[in-house]
Image (tube, rainbow, N blue to C red):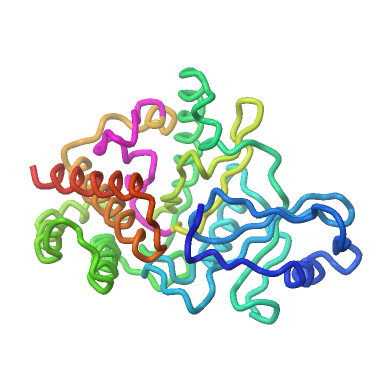
Amino acid sequence: MESLTKNRQTPETLRAMIQRAYGPDQVPGQDGDWCSELGHGWFNVAYKIRLRSGAPVVLKIAPPPGVEVMTYERGAMATELAALRLIREHTTVPVPAVDFADRSRELCDADWFAMPFVDGDNLGMLRDALTPAERESYQEQLGAATAELNTIRGTAFGPLTGPGSASWRTVFTSMIGSALDDGERRGVDLGRSFAVLRGLIESHAGSLDEVTEPRFVEWDLWDNNAMVRDGRIVAIIDHERAFWGDPLIEAGFTAAELPAFGDPTAFMRGYGHPQLTPSEQVRRRLYGLYLALIMVVETEYRAMTDPGHLDWVRARLDEAVDRLTH
């Protein structure tokens, strides 16, 4: 995926990174196809590297400091590193190990880290070739993995790296308010006034007070962030959006209120969640509105121009507003 946030590096810089992470004896030679960009992500740039030993690894590099990102994306790589540590320490959900992390900005202008390459297929890219039964099985597995991630308990709502708050209402209204601020700053057309949207959010914010225990939320666990092999999920990738919050905001629940995202039945079965209560439906509609706002506003920040994508995300925003309004 093409985006302004992708911080591509020269072969010389990539070799310097490999030397720092794995030692000089692992730096590839000048000849041969030792490096390729992994293109499915929207935010960071990631390279598949073949070390001199032949072992495949991945270098993941944060956006350059001169590129403006949305508020929730600031410090995303630090969030991902914290998420990987928490997941490995507290769950059995498979995630890549971190071989080396560098936040010194000495070799390039951004944070980066190195990890083993996961041998598997990206579920999002494989999806259209699957049978209905295979798709259902993977959705159940995603539900079960999400439920296990949500068992990690925090001490405050908010970013994994802090600061936090005892109030989920305070944190979430700040999150969605920041998305609106980001859009207003860039003059993004949302099809209705920012004041109307802020009033709509405030009128339903009381439903957030039911959430009193901070849980680890992955929030970005879509098919595109699951690697699969032989019918099983072998790794969950891209954790930079994680935070302490309400598990009901997780990606897999989105279709429960926004049907354009598919059928949530298999995910919810795997998760072990019954039908949503009326209060949970209100919270889910708030979370659907937040996601739709992010999807629309980020098209401006990442200079996305695909008319099909722009039309789709704007339709989802209209749908989310209608669901919350009515």
Residue drawn at 60 percent across, 72 percent down: 111
Percent across and percent down for residue 258 are 26, 38
Q: Quadrant of residue 276?
A: top left
Q: Is residue 16 above or below residue 267?
A: below
Q: Is residue 230 left or right of residue 153?
A: right
Q: Is residue 229 left or right of residue 315?
A: right
Q: Is residue 207 above or below residue 20?
A: above
259 magenta-colored:
yes
Depth check, front residue: 171 or 10: 10
174 magenta-colored:
no
Percent across and percent down for residue 137 are 50, 24
Residue range in magenta is 243-266
Q: State which quarter of the image contains the C terminus.
A: top left
Percent across and percent down for residue 40 are 55, 48
Depth check, front residue: 16 or 306: 306
Percent across and percent down for residue 8 are 61, 66
Residue drawn at 14 percent across, 63 percent down: 198
